[in-house]
Image (tube, grey):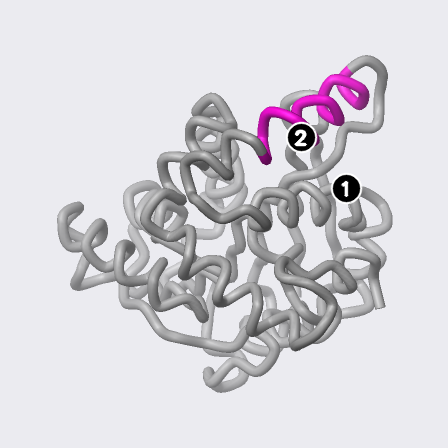
Amino acid sequence: MYDQEKIKPYGEDGEKGKMVEEMFDNISPTYDTLNHRLSWGIDRGWRKKAIRQLAPYRPQTMLDIATGTGDFAILAAQMLHPVRLVGADFSEGMMRIGRKKVEAAGFDKIISFAKEDCMQLSFEDESFDAVTAAFGIRNFQDLDRGLREMCRVLKKGGHLSIVELSAPVSFPMRQLFKVYSHTFLPFYGKIISKDDAAYNYLTATIEAFPQGEAMMDILHKAGFSSSSFRRLTFGICTMYFATK
């Protein structure tokens, strides 16, 4: 078990997956606003970089894991022009907002949403040309199992693109990020979302989540044949790319 799998948003008793689902349902009305404000809008650029990794391969069928309110899915549809993109999540509250955004963007014929448990996806083996995940895999109850499922539904020769928040490793960003993530982030998150625990939980999982070379080892163990990573914005975010 990895350290972030032991962290739960609402206490020690109960299943992590159920708690995370409840947490995202709770914060869904303010999630987009907080996401963009707390990252100073840089998160949009991170998503674009993760999508550009897939551009040379022109994926026609895509699965966006932990799709939330659909920001990554919409951007992928705009940039890559797939014929089919499924956004999978277990939070109905988040996807309800996502469906409205997709319709407003005019992508409702391309993007669909599916309530899914990422530990046990309902899709058949080798269903997608590309699988993506933005800021979601550190919430997995079982990271190894979730990544194996992502590999299973990916076609041979297909690609995985992940962008995930991470703790900087170099001075002075490591120290500055620690101050920001332990003071301003949970305080502001609590005021806007009205959820006392959510943004303390999110900070704790960022610090505990395996990153860099450790994450590449995990990807290989999950079944991916090759992988690479790149740190973005002084290490606040890390981008991963893997091939099945």
Q: In the rendered view, tell whether residue 54 sits above or below residue 110.
A: above
Q: Main secondary structure of the magenta part?
A: helix
Q: Pinpoint residue 4: horizontal percent, then vertical percent.
A: 76, 56
Residue labelled with disc 1? 207
Residue at image coords 47%, 85%: 122
Q: Amino acid at mark 1?
A: Glu
Image: magenta residue range = 173-186
Q: Nearer the viewer, residue 233 or 219?
A: 233
Q: Secondary structure at mark 2?
A: helix
Q: Residues within 10 Å of mark 1 (few under 14, many from 20)?
A: some
**Quick check: marks 2 and 1 in contact, CB under 8 Å?**
yes
Q: In the rendered view, tell whether residue 18 sits above or below residue 129.
A: below
Residue labelled with disc 2? 181
The extreme top residue here reads 172
Looking at the image, is mark 2 or mark 1 nearer the viewer?
Answer: 2
Residue at image coords 36%, 58%: 94
- The part of the image, by quadrant, that contains residue 194 is top left
Q: Nearer the viewer, residue 188 or 32?
A: 188
Q: Secondary structure at mark 1?
A: helix
Is 182 colored magenta in this rendering? Answer: yes
Q: Amino acid at mark 2?
A: Ser
Q: Pinpoint residue 124: horizontal percent, then vertical percent.
A: 48, 86
Q: Which mark is residue 22?
A: none
Q: Pinpoint residue 73: horizontal percent, then vertical percent.
A: 36, 52
Name the N-terminal-most of marks 2 and 1. 2
Q: Residues within 10 Å of mark 2 (few under 14, many from 20)?
A: many
- Distance from label 2 to label 1 (Cα)? 10 Å
Q: Is residue 60 left or right of residue 222?
A: left
Q: Pinpoint residue 238: horizontal percent, then vertical percent.
A: 67, 38
Which corner quadrant holds the C terminus?
bottom right
